[in-house]
Structure formats: structure tokens, C-alpha cells
Image (cartoon, coloured by chain):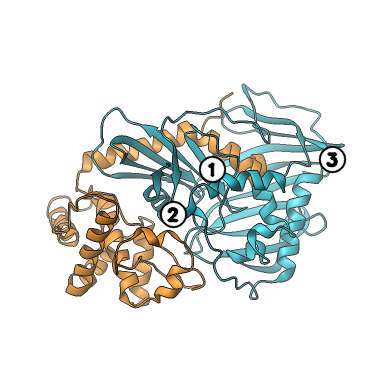
Chain colours: A cyan, B orange
Amino acid sequence: MVVLARLVLPILAFPALVMAQPETQCGDSDPAALQWLDKMSRSTQEISYQGVVTYQRGDDLQVMQLSRGVQGDVASDQITRLTGQGAQVVRDNHPLGLLHPGHMLLQLGDSSGGDCGLATHYRLSMGEGERVAGRQTVRLVMAPRDLYRYGYQLELDSTTALLLKASTVDRGDRVLERFQYADLAYSGRWHEEPGVDVVHRAGQAGQATPGPKMQMAWGLRWLPPGFVATEEQSAGAARRTYTDGMAVFSVFLETLAARMPSGEGVVREGSTTSYTRGIQLDGQPLLVTVIGEVPVNTARMLADSVTQAR
Amino acid sequence: MSEKLRESLSALMDDEADELELERVLSQISQNDELRSSWQGYHHARDAAAGQASTFTGIDISARVREAIAQDGATAQGKAPWWRPVASFAVAASVMATVGLGGQQLSQLNSGYQDRSSYAGNVSPVGLHNAVGATPMRASYGTRSVPALQPATNEAYRELARQRLKQYGQSHAEQAALNTPQGLIHFARVERITE
């Protein structure tokens, strides 16, 4: 909770950002679904497993090998691309006790999302899942209650609640992207490592992520309901990232040498939106970029709300 | 507002409207002078609130977009219309501005966010209820100045969006991996993972 408090404080510095939770109406959500979300969030952290995962968006299909090993109170994760670029992402010795804001939003007993938790922003329902990677699953459907986020159809291992398949769906019920396990074993790391060209050491909790800097103090006047900052916002950072526990978006700001004519650019890949817009703050021409797994309109509104902090 | 128009609106918001939908929404706006003047008044007030001189209260964007449609139909049949991203954006902004004034309940609209105080006078924030109807949706207001029909500029912005996705994708995935149940699978979205 201390971590969360530290994350929330910088937001309070912008009074307009202190959002009232909308009137919570979550009676239409299955209470069991909240329990499953909580269980999923914990099992993702606490269980050791390894498997082969497919990730699909449009015609693009990627295959990856993934493993998570938990020893004592630290975990090590690794993901290796088996198709396309020979790249590997490794995160070693990640402390289990350090919960990130996104995980807290999924777990029960946390007051930040109100009593309804994620059911405040998604209507949750349960169903019978299909077989994924040879295991029986339960289906958890998350339908967004507003237009700021996408919906999800999740298949959780009926025994361990591990997330085995996830589809992101838009308002027209079209699947934007999907990942699922093709093979899964509950144990530690792979013994045989595939060859890779690039190894990326992924960021750790509480570690200041190096990134581009921004001279001007800035903030957002508006956030979609239920989104919180993923990390403490350091002064001078050019990136701000927010999550509601399922969706994540990042807002980047950079100075431009000269003012660009007004306009906007949008590129979408799967559920990812990349949105750019030229603005001016205090006479300084800036480029706003929003990258996230959110609809285009959400990105536009975020770009609209970029403001200079006093 | 009819269900059909609502669907078109939704498509416009996602930049997925086809020309028929665009025309349908445009015709709705053009047939209702009151809605159009509300929209213009709204933008005027918003600019005033932001301390800027209003630059485009006199400009009827819907008319300009209709003109563009007509021109495009005459010159570039079958090709992807060069004006579309701008047009749909301008239309989305103008259409959305009318929605909140068209009978949605302001009390409901106001419950989801608190920055309404920054808007002037008796001008209401705009909003849209989705089919679920539980949470209000505030619409985009569009750019801060005239969304001009400049194909080169918008192609440049699209190219920027493409480049920035490559440039920032990994840093975004890093945060997503730490905060959602998919974990490191988020890196699958990164075009080229770098050290």
C-alpha cells in the first residue's frame, strides 16, 4: 500500500485529475468473476511455469517460448521469440512482494477501485471455457462499461487460474488480437535454450526507467475513469504511463524545433494505437504521442488534455 | 439519436467510417442549424476558456468536408480518399459536440470527470452514452485550431505515429509487462526488441 500511496500522490498535485469514481453499479457482475480475477493476478505472480505461446493480430502470427521460475521470494521471467527476430527478454530476481499498481487493481481487498474493483469499469461474467494447451479452462468475459477501453475474453486454467488465452475485442466484437498457450508445463525454466541475437533485460519494480527527458513540467488534465499511474512520476520524464489493470497507455511529449501545422496521425496494430498530434504549450511547439491498447478516441482525448504543470 | 447514427458515430470515432457513414452523419448535422450553431458556440467558449482568441467560429467544417467529399468523388474514384483522416476527425469532433446538447442528461455526464469547471459559462461538456449506458463518455474536442484539409501534413503525422510506435513501443511494453496479467507477452508487440 505504501507503494500505491507514493504513486497516487503526484496525481493529487493536479487537482483536476482527482476523479470522482462514477456511481458504482456492479451488481450485474458475477461476484465469482472478481474472485477469479484476484486468483489470476496472484497465480501469475506465484506459480512457476513454462510454455509455448502464440500471439496473433491480423495475419501476423508469432510464436514465443515463455518461462517463469519462482524461488523463495523472487521470480525470474524469460520470453524468447521463436519466429521472426531472434530476441529474448529476461527479468531476473524480481521481488514477489513488490506489487505493481496494475496487479493491485485486479486483487480484492484493495480500496483504490472501490468495492467493485474492476467491475466498476467492466461488466464481468463467467462461462465455460474451452480446452487450451490441453487444459480445461473457465471463461471470464470483461465487457467495458464505457468507450474508453476494449473488452477482453480470458480463459483461465480451471485449477490454477493462470491466464492461458486472452482475446482483446472492440465494440463491434471483433477480435483485435489474441494470445494463447499452445503448450504448458508447471515447472521451472527450459533446459534447452533456443539461440538468440538480442537479449533485453526488462525493467524492475521501483527502478527508474531511463528515457527521454522533458524540460517543461507537464501533466494530464483528464484520465479515463479507473486508470492510475504505473510508477512514481519523476520530474522531467517525457513519458507517463497509466493502467486500469488490463489496459495500459503511455503518453510521450517531445519538444519540436518549429511549430507543425495542426493535424493528427493514427496507426493501429492489433489492439495498439499510436497517435500523434502537434500542440503548443506556453508558446513551445510540442509533439504528443499516445501509445496504448486503447481506442483511438481515448488517445485523442489524452492528447487534448496535455497541460503545463505549475 | 437513432441507433444507425450512433453506430456511424462510433465508427467515426475509430476512424473506421466509410464514406456512406460520413455522408449520413454530415447530412444529419447539415439539416439541423441549431445543432451546428451549438457546435460553433461551444468551440468559441472553449477557446475563450483556454485563453485563446477563437479562430474558427465562423468556419463550418461540415460544409468543408462535404465539399471535399464532392471533390474527391469527382477526381479520385476508387482510390483511398486523401482527406479522410482529417475529414472523419473534424466530423467526429463536430458530431460529438452536438451529442451532449442533444438531450443527454447533464447530471449523468458530469459524474465521471471533474475538469468541467474549466469550461466556460453555460456551455455543457459533450458526451455520449454507449449501449451499456453506465458511464458517460466525453468526446474528443478535436485539435486546438482549425483541422485544415492538408493531406501532406496528415501523411506526415501518420508517418510520425508509425515512427514513434517503433521508437517508444518497447518502453511502453516494459510498463505493460509489469502491470498486467499478460506479463512479458507484451513484448510480442514490439517490432524489434533492442537491448
Q: Is residue B183 left or right of residue B121?
A: right
Cα distance, mark 2 to mark 1? 14 Å
Q: Please, which residue is most extreme toward the front here?
A: A310
Contact between marks 2 and 1 (CB within 8 A): the answer is no
Percent of width and height locating residue A184: 77, 45
Nearest the camera: B151 or A28?
A28
| Label 3 secondary element | loop
Q: Earlier in the sequence, mark 2 or mark 3?
A: 3
Give the amino acid type for the residue marked by disc 3 in the picture. Answer: Ser
Q: Are marks 2 and 3 on the same chain?
A: yes
Contact between marks 2 and 3 (CB within 8 A): the answer is no
Tell me the residue that label 1 is attached to. A241
Residue B57 sits in which quadrant? bottom left
Q: Are marks 3 and 1 on the same chain?
A: yes
Q: Earlier in the sequence, mark 3 or mark 1?
A: 3
Tell me the residue that label 2 is attached to. A298
Q: Earlier in the sequence, mark 2 or mark 1?
A: 1
Tell me the residue that label 3 is attached to. A187
Cα distance, mark 2 to mark 3? 40 Å
Cα distance, mark 3 to mark 1? 33 Å
Give the amino acid type for the residue marked by disc 1 in the picture. Answer: Thr
Nearest the camera: B60 or B173?
B60
- In the rendered picture of this protein, how many numbered marks are placed on residues? 3
Q: Find residue B106 and name its label.
A: none
Q: Is residue A96 left or right of residue A177?
A: right
Q: Residue at x 64, y 43 (%)?
A: A6
Any part of residue B190 in sight: no
Q: For mark 1, name the chain.
A: A
